[in-house]
Image (spheres, helix red, strand yellow):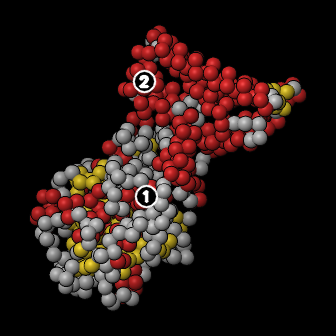
Amino acid sequence: MLNLFNRTHSSRTVIIAVSFFWIFFTNFTFFNHVLKIYPPSLLNSISIFSLTIVLLSTTILILTLIVNRWIFKPFMIILLMVTASVAYFMDSYDIVVDTHMITNIMQTNFNESADLFSLKMVAYILFLGVLPSWIVYKLQITHLPYKKQIISDIKTVALIVVIVAATILTFSKFYTSFFREHKPLRYYANPSFCLYSVGKSVSDACSYESKELKLIGQDAKISSNDKNRKLIILVVGESARADHFSLNGYSRETNPLLKKEDIINFSDFTSCGTETAVSVPCMFSSFGRKEYEGKKALYTENVLDVFTHAGANVLWRDNNSDSKGVALRVPYEDFKLPKNNTMCSDGECRDEGMLVGLQKYIDAHPKGDIVIVLHQMGNHGPAYYKRYPKEFEKFTPVCKTNQLEQCTQAEITNAYDNVILYTDYFLSKVIGLLKQNDNSFGTAMFYVSDHGESLGENGLYLHGFPYAIAPDTQKHVPAVMWFGKQFKVNKDKLAKKAKESLSHDAYFHTALNLLDVNTTVYKPELSILNGIH
């Protein structure tokens, strides 16, 4: 080891050594997925060996292009730490780090990050990040003179291009299958796909032309036919999947209280994204999934702004990380903080706490319609066991660690279902609050989860997979409506419509319809309630 530090090493040697290290120590998940599609055989072994050469060559190429003498050590150390973190999450939860996941990471708060902490994570960071970073830091690295370095880099790039091209041409049949039929496999390549995603995220952030807020629905008015004041509570769920609601036929009784209410259950509802950072702003925007872009939505008013233009009183209460930019221009209350949420213990604030003092807010607004958004912590993983009070631990034994790979799928499912049971209770309390105001308002609740969750099926955990390859468990979400006695709606017609395939695309227009808002931005054909009154 001392000899390693006492002699000098060229920057190219270090790049090649780090690339080898990454390929063979941080790509277990990548090769595991490759072997599932190309099981061991003589021919497949040769093809996978060629894939290793391509992956190694590509990694060397990327480092050669992005690292220079002035930032060499700091940049390599940063990349080593990032690659170690990516390896941990891929190996533990089988997730991929794409642009949406990077957005999630940037918007994750400390408490959410703490839920992911484990000794296994420390080991990954220590042995795959800190240790090799320390070695790079201690090495004596030499760089060629500037002009010679450029010529050397050009030669390296040219050689790699030749090697990659020759390898792909030699095994063209394999790579035709790999790139065309199994495109998602490349998402697991570490660190190349992560670096690509970071570059794309930066590019997307810089490419949006307008930074001025685009106003919409300024002509919004409450319908003159609406004689009664409205009190609407929109509940945004977190990581709840439709197939774990007993309302949708789940074998376990996870909705014992909701089934007693006169609710409308939507059995085939699809999310806009597979992560909160996409789904929540997409739900409240007017764009729909196909037209949605994060920056475009951030700089365009959403349905809450249209409510405000129409004269409604709007309040957002949040027991999650934040509103993901949706509630920037309306009153916002953070119920992750014990000073606001009176129902906190052991560092966990309960969703039920968002209802405390809500009647006081309602009474303080004697004029105008009221729209209240409650953003749940819900089934936020991986520490499902923290998300419900002890009295809701009906399904046992439960997984009581954030390292889901250490638990059986049954234990993970038990903990997850207990949270669904608590959400059922929470929604029944929301309905109870609305019933107390039934004589003064036309009351309604609309609950929809932001996205679903994987619980170990096919080795997948949590959420955030690229939408094109995400399993239905991450996209099929529960949705429920409840209406008070003064709210005019044909429940028989709505119950029939509830059996149709619906999605978050309907959320913006349905929310406007709930409040009887007339505006040019409203598209009646996209509203679930269109023609139901």
- Depth order, front residue of 13/471: 13
At label 2, the amino acid type is: Phe
Instruction: Please identify, in this view, whether the residue under mark 2 or under mark 1 is nearer the observer.
Output: 1
351 w.r.t. 42: above or below? below
Labels 2 and 1: the sequence-earlier one: 2
Give residue 185's position: percent from left, percent from top. 45, 30
142 w.r.t. 398: above or below? above
Query: Can residue 58 be seen at all in this image of the molecule?
Result: yes
- Depth order, front residue of 251/127: 127
Q: Which residue is mark 2?
A: 178
- Depth order, front residue of 335/78: 78
Image-quadrant location for residue 432: bottom left
Residue at image point 28% right, 67% down: 521
Q: Is the Cβ of the residue at disc 2 closer than 8 Å to that at disc 1? A: no
Residue 315's disc is none
**Horizontal arrangement in the rendering, residue 143 relative to residue 55 (left or right):** right
At label 1, the amino acid type is: Lys
